[in-house]
Amino acid sequence: MKNKTALVTGAGKGLGFEVVKLLSSSGVQVFLTARDLKKAEVAYNSLGDFKKNIRLVELDVANPGSVKAAFEKINSEIDSLDILINNAGINYDTWQKAINADIEVECKVTMETNFYGPWRMIKTFLPLLLKSTQGRIVNVSSEAGSIAGLTGGIPAYATSKAALNALTKTVAGELKTNKILVNSVCPGWCATEMGGAGGRSPVLGAKSILWAAELPDDGPTGGFFRDGKSLNW
Ligand SMILES: NC(=O)c1ccc[n+]([C@@H]2O[C@H](COP(=O)([O-])OP(=O)(O)OC[C@H]3O[C@@H](n4cnc5c(N)ncnc54)[C@H](OP(=O)(O)O)[C@@H]3O)[C@@H](O)[C@H]2O)c1
């Protein structure tokens, strides 16, 4: 992984931060991006030796101007981007159902971050990804968005992740000739702010995500995985 470049969204805490730690410890130059740079700085300052491989960049995936500004900054610092990890995500809305959901605010805000955010990131950073010879895009999804398993509940989150999975397949198909591998990954239930207590270690979730970032050139594209094993769409 040495000499590679990577960008992780929503990386100031949780799984994104764990992914940054693992990538930087294997020698990858990582852009730790977060919508609140002050919070991210605190996380960054807790790291030891591997800080040298990490650069902090402010990036709110729900804000087109922020994504564009981050692209301009990063584009001026690197020639190509090897790995884009769309990790930022919100709103595990256990308190509502599709039949009574707050569509106009809550569901739209969730879509903006969980679905349009990754789409916006892919579109904006594509010029840098296309300059890599080993481009990888990882959309951090959830089995909660598996259409095969939907039975009702968490409507904003589940539909946003199902839409993200559709985006994964669509973009994977469009980038096949460019040899960029695009996959959705479920990290599993992990003990983060979103996951709450009781889930597995965030390091295991991060490893599940990294599996798709480290795929060999003949690896799968357009798939949905957890811990390297296929999940049902
Ligand atoms: N934990 C689980 O059990 C689990 C299971 C399946 C899938 N996932 C997925 O894994 C990913 C990471 O989740 P997590 O468990 O690490 O959750 P988390 O601890 O709540 O972290 C989410 C991260 O996303 C960031 N974020 C939210 N909105 C953003 C925006 N508009 N722009 C940029 N960053 C934004 C947050 O930043 P702030 O600090 O500024 O809020 C935070 O850094 C998510 O996509 C989630 O859906 C998690």
Image (tube, rainbow, N blue to C red):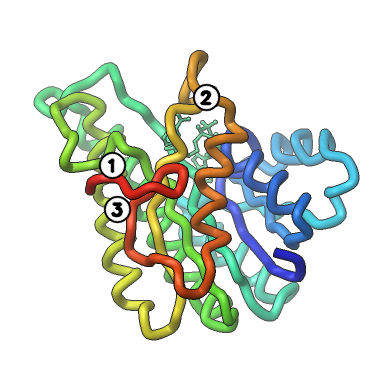
Q: Quadrant of residue 116?
A: bottom left
Provide the secondary structure element on which disc 1 rests.
Answer: helix
* Residue 195 locus on image (x, y percent): 46, 24
Disc 3 target residue = 165
Residue 72 appears in the rendering: yes
Amino acid type, residue under disc 2 in the picture: Arg
Disc 1 target residue = 108
Q: Quadrant of residue 66?
A: bottom right
Amino acid type, residue under disc 1 in the picture: Lys
* Quadrant (top left, top right, bottom left, bottom right) of the N terminus: bottom right
- Give left or right: position of 213 versus 149: right
Residue 113 appears in the rendering: no
* Residue 110 locus on image (x, y percent): 34, 39
- Give 188 or 166, whichever is nearer the viewer: 188
* Residue 85 locus on image (x, y percent): 53, 55
* First in sequence: mark 2 vs mark 1: 1
Q: Crowding at label 2, few (<14), some or many (≥20) Cα neighbours within 10 Å?
A: some
- Give 177 or 8, whichever is nearer the viewer: 177
- Give 97 or 212, whichever is nearer the viewer: 212
Q: Residue at x 75, y 66 (%)?
A: 2
Q: Residue at x 75, y 73 (%)?
A: 77
Q: CA distance from mark 2 to mark 1?
A: 29 Å
Q: Residue at x 22, y 31 (%)?
A: 155
Q: Crowding at label 3, few (<14), some or many (≥20) Cα neighbours within 10 Å?
A: many
Q: Height in image: 169 above or below 109? A: below
Give the number of the mark in front: 1 or 3: 3
Disc 2 target residue = 200
Labelled pair 3, 2 in contact (Cβ < 8 Å): no
Q: Height in image: 119 above or below 130? A: above
How many labels were placed on the picture?
A: 3
